[in-house]
Amino acid sequence: MRVLLLKTSSMGDVIHTLPALTDAGKALPGIRFDWVVEKSFAEIPPWHPLVDKVIPIALRRWRKNIFAKETRQEWQAFRQTLNERDYDLVLDAQGLAKSAFLSLFTKGPRAGLDWGSAREPLASLIYQKKHTVDFYQHAIRRMRLLFSLALGYPMPETDPVFGLTMPSAPESATEKYIVFLHGTTWESKQWPESYWMQLADFAGAAGYRVKLGGGNPAEVARAERIGKHNTCVDVMPYMSIQTMAGLLSHAKAAVAVDTGFGHLAAALDVPTVSIYGSTNPDHTGALGKTSVHLAPDFACAPCLKRVCAYKEPAEVTPACYATIPPKRVWETVQRLTNEFGS
């Protein structure tokens, strides 16, 4: 059986989909997947052994340059690639109008979430097979249930298995380090910079090096300020997803905000402490065998707002993070490394 999967972004969403592929492989021997994904995340799907072909798309860039000659040429090449193969099923796991639109250019019966389940209900009008999946549950379980319904096997009740077979990076000799994953898109997800500095102090006192970097100028500047605070911090150059995965795979632990690399660390079974403020870990938390979520004890959290709207005087901004201070995070790191670290 050959399935075309549409799950274009974000990094966390792509990673959340991997356990559903593992389920399908166990239930339906011989099943294979091709995967349409944003070019910036195209390194991830090949890490799963059931993915044969990755079809990259640059939809975000195309929309910014919709009338450019290069955009037209890339769009035509993308459509031609979609039409090279007939599929037994085309599964839109994104549930958005844009992904449903893309499915129109494929060869095969189209399936996805129904009107009440899709993030954008209009997307369901394009599918020939529609499935009901409760939105209010973790994204990984949602994906596993959608795949089971679309492909016709019982939903497994086992723990999710990501099935990553990515090439391993050479291990640093005997270096003992922790990775700080501080970069995130929403302002309300950003743990205070002073807290990262205090956490680096805890790590350095315990004999760890700290590795951190950044994906844009603001994140790089923050990393450099944290690096100047403590000599145990190594500010890393920009790394591809593959290179970052190699760095994470040999870390003793990772500390992350709600960010794609935090999901990757958890999926790699690195002891991972994920810090949540404005978002809900029950729905989108990083899951793995050795991951822990820390959520705030605060009246308006999770607010699901991109910018903190709390107006009262507060110890830090976002205000809810005052309930997740560095000492609490470090104690959680110590517990995880003692239990699962090597």
Image: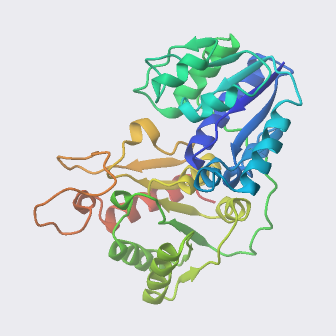
Q: Residue 190 location, x and y as percent? A: 38, 63
Residue 42 visible in rendering: yes
Residue 16 falls left or right of residue 219: right
Instruction: Judge whether 202 appears above or below 294 on screen.
Output: below
Residue 25 falls left or right of residue 260: right
Instruction: Judge whether 166 appears above or below 107 on screen.
Output: below
Residue 269 falls left or right of residue 52: left
Residue 51 visible in rendering: no
Furthest residue to the right? 84
Identified at 71% across, 30% down, the residue is 5
Q: Quadrant of residue 225?
A: bottom left
**What's the coloring here?**
rainbow
Q: Residue 312 location, x and y as percent? A: 10, 61
16 or 249, nearer to the observer: 16
Identified at 33% across, 61% down, the residue is 328
Q: Is the N terminus in the top left, top right, bottom left or bottom right quadrant?
A: top right
Residue 326 falls left or right of residue 220: left
Q: Quadrant of residue 157?
A: top right
Q: Residue 123 location, x and y as percent? A: 54, 24
Furthest residue to the left? 312
Q: Residue 238 location, x and y as percent? A: 65, 73
109 or 308, nearer to the observer: 109
174 or 3, nearer to the observer: 3
Identified at 43% across, 17% down, the residue is 116
Q: Is the C terminus in the top left, top right, bottom left or bottom right quadrant?
A: bottom right
340 or 225, nearer to the observer: 225
Identified at 41% across, 80% down, the residue is 201
Instruction: Judge whether 25 appears above or below 154 on screen.
Output: below
Number of labelled discs? 0
